[in-house]
Image (spheres, rainbow, N blue to C red):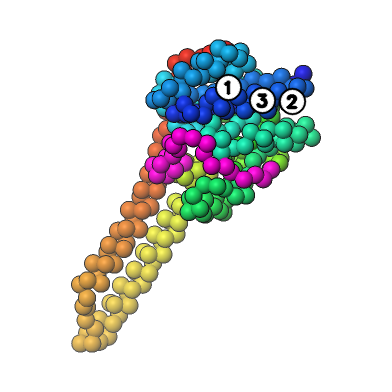
Amino acid sequence: MKKLSIMVPCYNEEENVVPMSEALVKQLSEMPEYDYEIVFIDNCSLDSTREKLRQICKGNKKIKAIFNTRNFGQFNSPYHAICQTTGDCTITLCCDFQDPVEMIPKFVAEWEKGYKIVCGVKTSSKENKIMYALRSLYYKLIKKMSRAEQIEHFTGFGLYDKSFVDVLRRLDDPIPFMRGIVGELGPKVKTIEYEQQRRRAGKTSNNFYSLYDAAMLSFTSYTKIVPRLAVFGGAFISGTSALAALVCLVLKLIAPWRFFTSGTAAIILTLLFVAGIQLFFTGFIAEYIMNINTRVMKRPLVVEEERINF
C-alpha cells in the first residue's frame, strides 16, 4: 500500500489546526487505498497552537508534529518538514485553508499517471485584489529574469514524489527557495489550476518585510539581471558623461564667449539622480552578498525543540 505524506506548516494557527486536521483525516479516509501520515511543523507559535497540536497527535498516531525552538522563517521550516516525511509522495498545503484540501485527490491522480511533481497554480484568488495584482506582477518579473523556469502563481502548494524529496534532502541549502528549486532541479511538472480561498480564521503572519524577504531571496538566488544592469547602466552613464564633458570642452575652446554654465539646481538634481542609481544598485548587490554569506555559514535549516509521534 502506498503512503501519502501531508505536510502542514503553521504559525499562530490556534483557530485552524484542529479544523485542518479534521478536514485532512476526512479527505484521506475517502482514499482507503492509501496509507497516510500528517506532519505539522510549528514555527514557534505564540498562541495555543502547540497545545492543540499535542491533543491532536494524542488522538491520532498518524498525525505527527515538529516544534521549532524559534521562528526560522517561512521557507526553512516547511522545507525541513518535507525532508522529514516518509511517504511515497509528500503533499504540502497551508494551515489557513487557502489551499483547498479537496485538491489532494487530483494531485494524487496525476502522480499515479507518472508525474513526479504536481503543482497547484492559482488562476484567481479571493484575497485582496491589489495584493493579487502585485503578486502577478512579481511572478511575471521573476519569470522573465530567472535563469531557471519559474511557474507563475505557484506558492509551493502541490505534490512531490519521494525521489524529488530525496533530492531536497541532499541539497544542503541553508536558505532554500522551494519555488525556484522546483523550476531548477525538478523533473517534468504537471500544473493544476485552482482558486485560492480566503483565510478561514486568524490573521496572516505575512507583512511587508516577509514579502520583501521572499522577493529578494528569489531575485538573488535565481537572477543575474540586477548586477548586469548595474554594469551596463554604469558604463552608459560614464560614457555619456565623458562625451558631454568632451562637447563642453570643445565648445569652450571654440567659442568661450558663447559658452557658459548655469543652473545650480540642475547640477544638484543630476548629482542626486546619479547618487540614487548608485545607492540602489549598491543595496541590491548587498542583498546578493548577504545571500552568499548566509549560504557560506552553513547553518541548519531549523533547530527542533520537540517531536511527537515520530
Q: Residue at (46%, 17%) from the top-left corner?
A: 51
Residue 31's disc is 2
Who's the residue at 54% across and 24% down the image?
18
Q: Quadrant of residue 289?
A: top left
Residue 112 x/y as whole percent: 77, 31
**Which residue was labeled with disc 1?**
39
Q: Nearer the viewer, mark 3 or mark 1?
A: 3
Q: Position of residue 6 (x, y in %)?
A: 62, 26
Residue 113 seen:
yes
**Left of 260 or right of it: where is 168?**
right
Badge 1: how crowded within 10 Å, few (<14), some, or many (20+)? many
On whether residue 82 falls in the magenta region, the answer is: no
- Asked if one can make out residue 88 in the rendered structure from this viewpoint, the answer is no
Amino acid at dot 3: Lys
Q: Nearer the viewer, residue 109 or 150?
A: 109
Q: Which residues are magenta?
A: 192-214
Density class for disc 2 (Cα within 10 Å; few <14, some 14-19, many ≥20) is few
Label whose residue precedes the other's in the sequence (2 or 1): 2
Q: Which of marks 1 and 3 precedes in the sequence?
A: 3
